[in-house]
Amino acid sequence: TRFFLELSRADRSPRTWCISYLWVTNPMPKGKKGKNKAAPAKKAPIDKTPEGKKKDVQSSPIPDAYYPSYVEAAWYEWWEKCGFFKPDFKHKDEVTDFKEKFIMVIPPPNVTGTLHLGHTLMCAIEDTITRWHRMQGKKTLWLPGTDHAGIATQSVVEKKLMREKKLRRQDLGREKFLEEVWKWKEQSGSHICRQLRRLGSSCDWSREAFTMDKQLNVAVKEAFCRMYNKGLIYRKARLVNWSCKLQTAISDIEVDKIDIEKPKMIKIPNHDKEVEFGVLHKFRYKMKGDSKRSIIVATTRIETMLGDVAVAVHPSDERYKDLVGKELEHPFIKDRKMKVITDDVLVDPKFGTGAVKITPAHDPNDFECGMRHKLVFINILNDDGTMNENAGPYKGMKRFEVRSKIIKDLKNLDLYEGKEVNKMVLGFCSRSGDVIEPIIRPQWWVDCTDMARRSVEAVDKGDLEILPKSHLSTWDFFMKNIQPWCISRQLWWGHRIPAYFITVEGYKPTESELLKAEREGYKVGSDADANFWVAARDEKEAQTLACSRFKDYDPASISLRQDDDVLDTWFSSGLFPFSTMGWPEETPDFKEFFPGHLLETGHDILFFWVARMVMMSLELTDKLPFKTVFLHAMVRDKLGRKMSKSRGNVVDPIHVMEGVSLQVLLDKIQKGNLAKAEHKTAMEAQKKDFPKGIPECGADALRYGLMTYMKQGKSINLDINVVVSCRHFCNKLWNATKFALSMFSKDFKVPNTSAWAVATKDEIKDESVGMSEVDKWILAKLYRATKDCNEGFEKWELANVADACRRFWLNEFCDYYLEMVKPIMYGKDSTEEQKVAVQRTLYICIDGGLRLLHPLMPFVTEELYQRIPGRDHSPEAFDSIMLARYPHPKASARWEDAQIEVLMEKAIKVIGEIRSLKARVGMQNKDKPPCYLYVQSESGADIGRLSEAIKAMANISDVKISSDQKKIPKGCLLAVCGEYEVSLPIEGFVDLPKLCVGYEKKMDDAVNQAADLKAKMSKPNYMTKTPEAIKQKNSSKLEGFNVSAKSYEESLKMFLGMMSVESRKRLHESKIATAKAGVAKSSADVKKLTDQIPAKEDPKYKKLMHKIEPKLKKAKMLLNKFQKRLATLEAMS
């Protein structure tokens, strides 16, 4: 519709214009000859600026079009070298100390990582917000860093060692292996930081932190020791998520939970055969001493029965009342003590058999049950997933091999009751693909209860704000139901736990120690005994603490061993906001930049990271780490599906920025880590989504495109075509600025007023000299955009900021203002004063518009900002748009003019109606009829203030406003537009007879199409056999044909009414002549074909009739049509 409304502005006829547009969007396939040939794509100019130097935009003309690779070159290196990202870099107009600050730390991406769309969205949001604050004159720090990513990094280096040297980490030993990890980190660990730079991230890289830096390690040790000494960190045997492949505990966020709807065979690491999941196995336990009685239980993990210590029933269940307290017989471990217990928390008597097997050491629910009933906790698994000595005859076997063996053995004992389908949720290790095993083992834990309470209070009191507020319920749920946090990881890469195990030679436990150990299931003096552990910053301190604790023993008999485990990555990340500022020391950075103002991250780590930062900061510094938490959505594909390599819907941001062919996308799938079985699905998806690859869009378009999605809730369903359209926006911005720059004369003087500085009375007076109504309107729109952008930032509605910028640049400045001022700048009747006013307004709009857009699109705005008059273009100049003031509504409030905005809105609608009327009758671009506006109110006549703008945009000769309908000539096309009646004379501009013939043909076509479709819909069985969707579609089409026919008929009557009697008579006679000619020709065709029909006895009769009959039928139909037409016309005479 918008293209069609622009027809009158094109230099070609509407039909030619549309065909040209279709040619551009659907070029002729290769191999087909055509008059038009697609022009070869122009190559982007190459920027030759030395690294770190300012781009010279004056020595060469501005390129004809927008090329992302050229525009985005050189600027970032110059920004960084000049130190613009540092908080102490002052604006050129700053004469005093900074009055306000803005501090934010980046959510540190994994050092192993490469840029994905989640990082890109994070970067786009955070850099946009940072640049806005910097342009407001604040002392701004956005601190970057990377996370050591314990499991991920160790896994990468282990695979590298095996691939290159055929070595395991155990072959090297801990110290040599860590040397390899650090070597890898130095060589490859900064890749993602380079990619963040590519996106334009204005971080202070001089403060870049790595969570394994020496200073951050000091902070980790200090935090651990303080929390240990306060009793918040303790050692205890509890259930953990165990990865048998990696042989470590992992956090909940590293567990991928998959719904199993029906029985499914799954390949498990270190197992040769696939394993069945999604089934419930039933088997019987016999009562000890009474083999005739038994109790049936069910489980999805039948191998865990080797760790069973009880069967629980509900206390009110009459079926098992006589069995409660009695012992059970384990079929494979004869000395295992088991009994029937009651539990009203775990057991639902209505579910299944009403009896539940209890494996406290391998199930979270059973663990809680075991704690309630003080049951024995029996671990049956080794670290690698094989069975240990507690598994009896199955010792040494792999866990899933045991599953099938136990089923077989239970069947032999006649104890297996079969299996049934069971929907379940299965947890997989996100790093190894292994099925997670809940295992009980001694670990270090954090008691988060009090810290969580303080964190909830901070939100409730309004000291900490979480946005969007829809996430508050998630926050409250996690924090009010918080569990102990396991911080041990059985890895080598990471912060080694600053805890030391004490061995005391000849130690004699007390009776109370023995009782406690028996009650909690450990041996005195063993690894699980917390009394034999101390936390210390170094071994010397640990030795002192150990001797103090066991002061009754000779210090020579006391030895230490530091824990081999490392801390959970989230522990060091939880300290990031203040450890990066120098804590625990009171450094200058800590005093000035802590606490921060904002934490922006994905909502998926609200609990795993954000909550832990808040808790640890409150505990260790007694301060909140930031005032606001802003959570962004998760990026999904355009269909709302999670992006995954197997689906083939993963989009590499670098491909979007730099462009990529389909072949490269397919090659990447084949050469990547994706299983070969999934290649076909992934490649087909890529071919469907990107049949021609992905065009080069640039960082600006990608950032802006993501910002436009910020209205969506917890998911962003990203369509790459939206990013492509944003690249077109960049091109429009480029061309509009280039065109506007051509309007500035050599002696142009930069105006004293702007959108960011409050003007004096004299400056306002000078600014208004020669200003037209159109100038006033565009400045009012600039004020509106400024207000909307600032409100969008303040309310965290970044999509509204993007919309306001796009609306101003495209819909207002480009589409209307530039077109409206052309007659002033290039017209002969314009005064010099008017031209100067236009130039002044253009400058203010371009300067202000680029500043508004800069936080979202840093590169193209810098490039264009450096090209507008008034900039210091010398290589030494520090004149950058990122240091320019951001437009403010208080400064531009003088342009607020609701009246002119309303008036222009009316004018734009009138322009649209005029264009529509001209297009309706096929008026050429050269045709410039006058336009009459009939108004009934005095206020309606105010539109005359914009008559010149209407003339320019609607391509008409004059706008005549009247409140007297008698003054409006007859023979006009009419349209009602709000309070206006638009009349457009067409006499002398349109061939009415020809127009009538065309509309009559359109009407006939619509009537015939409606008749054909109606006949089709009237056939027998149509209503019963036709699908409902097709019937609805046909009904809509029929209604459309009828509406079109009616519309054409009314238009035809109107056009005929505009013609004189003589003209209508000549047109009627012309139609009769045409009909007679048609009858004559069709009659001749019928006779000619009839004469060709041979006698039926002719052997070629059938063959000839097969060719002649269709032609004869068509000729007779045409003859019948023309005869009816002629009869109708003669009757009308």
Image (cartoon, rainbow, N blue to C red):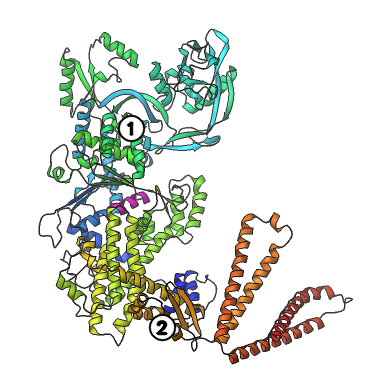
Is mark 2 in CB contact (under 8 Å) with mark 1? no
Which residue sits furthest bottom?
A: 1062
Q: Is residue 116 magenta?
A: yes
Q: Quadrant of residue 709?
A: bottom left
> What secondary structure prevails in the magenta region?
helix
Total number of numbered discs in the rendering: 2
Which residue is at 32% across, 44% downward?
112
Q: Is residue 1009 above or below residue 787?
A: below
Which label lies toward us, 2 or 1?
A: 2
Q: Amino acid at mark 1?
A: Lys
What is the C-alpha distance between the residues marked 2 and 1? 70 Å
Query: What residue sits right under mark 1 in the picture?
Result: 480
> 772 or 65: which is nearer to us?
772
Expressed as whole percent of the image width and height from the top left, the position of residue 1122 reads 71, 82
Instruction: Locate the C terminus and report the quarter of the image it occupies.
Output: bottom right
Which residue sits furthest top?
A: 289
Q: Which mark identifies residue 956?
A: 2
In magenta, the rendered stretch is 109-128
Please indicate whether residue 92 sits to the left or right of residue 804 in the image: left
Q: Amino acid at mark 2?
A: Ile
Expressed as whole percent of the image width and height from the top left, the position of residue 590 reads 15, 42
> 755 or 708: which is nearer to us?
755
Please indicate whether residue 1062 sits to the left or right of residue 738 in the image: right
Mark 2 lies on a secondary structure that is loop
- Residue 377 visible in the displayed image: no
Mark 1 lies on a secondary structure that is helix
Which residue sits furthest right?
A: 1097
Q: Quadrant of residue 474?
A: top left
Which residue is at 47% across, 20% downward?
306
